[in-house]
Amino acid sequence: IMKMLYSGLFLLSILAFSTSFQIRLSTFELRNRPSQKSCLYNFLDDYKSSIDGPEDGSVDGEFPPSVCPSEIHRIRFSTTAGDFTIRLDRALSPSGVARFLELVDDGFFNEQLLYRVDPGFVIQFGIACDPQLQSRWDPKAGAPIAPLPDEPNRQKFRAGSVSFAGSGIDSRSCHFCIALEPFGEDLGTSPHETVLGNIEVEDGGILALESIVRNREDQGYGNLLDIQGSLTRGGNAAVISQYPGVDRIVACGRI
């Protein structure tokens, strides 16, 4: 009888221990299991990340996103070497595109010399044919306006990309360049180098750029970057006799 009693007590002890262990394990799992609310938040966060992109605000890990909707403006340029169309997008550089359009509407680019031509790198313009017109838009020529603050570059440069030309931080005013391949594709590292838009290729715009470069090479003038000062102070008349035949913008306007 005593043997049977001891066996029963032993079995009861094992059963009590097993029950206690299961209760503790269940309590641990409940405490450490994510709540339904937490799971819902994680799902929403994952969905938002898939829509918005990385938390650092980059696009494909390289360029920051735009801060405004896309808004296309097309500007037709007629030059002595051929015509081309610049397709601007406000989403790339809101204040930069706005300034470019202001200059177009003011007739600032008409009759300007395409004074700097660096084959394989850039074509530069942005000095008015008349010094009085330059003094309305160029702070260095006395314009009563400040240069534009820099904006982040949101697109890789390629042949035909249009950007401000400048000289450091917050130096964008009225000077522009058009990238040429192959070295113009490396632009985008300086603060003022932000793509505003690109030359449309469908209507032969790149051919006009190639013609401008070919003409300069045939003339043997070099890049003419050193005539900026004379051109700013005296307009086209100050340099045209020394450098006849330099290509120029005849007119431009919105289309």
Image (tube, rainbow, N blue to C red):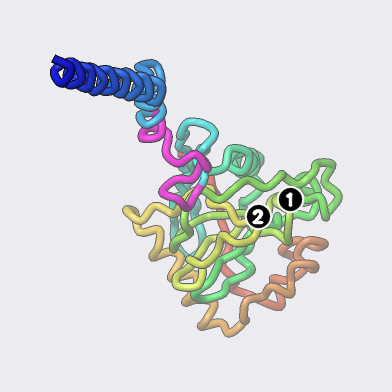
Foreground pick, 14 / 76: 14
State the residue at coordinates (62%, 54%).
164
Residue 225 visible in the displayed image: yes
SS state under label 1: loop
Q: Report how far apart the C-alphas of labels 2 and 1 lie in the structure.
A: 7 Å
Would you call the spot at circle 2 few (<14 residues within 10 Å), some (14-19), or many (20 or more)? many
Residue 40 visible in the displayed image: no
Question: How would you classify the magenta stretch by its main secondary structure?
Answer: loop
Residue 183 lies left or right of residue 170; in this view the side is left
Label 1 sits on what residue type? Answer: Asp
State the residue at coordinates (46%, 56%).
156
Looking at the image, the residue that sits furthest to the front is 1
Q: Quadrant of the N terminus?
A: top left
Ranked by sequence position, the earlier of labels 2 and 1 is 1
Provide the residue designation for mark 2. 192
SS state under label 2: loop
Q: Magenta segment, which residues?
A: 48-63
- Residue 79 screen position, x and y as percent: 51, 59
Residue 22 lies left or right of residue 250; in this view the side is left
Q: Quadrant of residue 231?
A: bottom right
Foreground pick, 100 / 69: 69
Foreground pick, 125 / 129: 125
- Mark 2 and mark 1 residues within 8 Å of each other at the beta carbon: yes
Label 2 sits on what residue type? Answer: His
Q: Image height check: is 89 above or below 8? A: below
Q: Does the magenta run of residues contain 62?
A: yes
Provide the residue designation for mark 1. 170
Residue 3 lies left or right of residue 201; in this view the side is left
State the residue at coordinates (57%, 74%).
118
State the residue at coordinates (66%, 55%).
191
Q: Quadrant of residue 31?
A: top left
Foreground pick, 202 / 164: 164
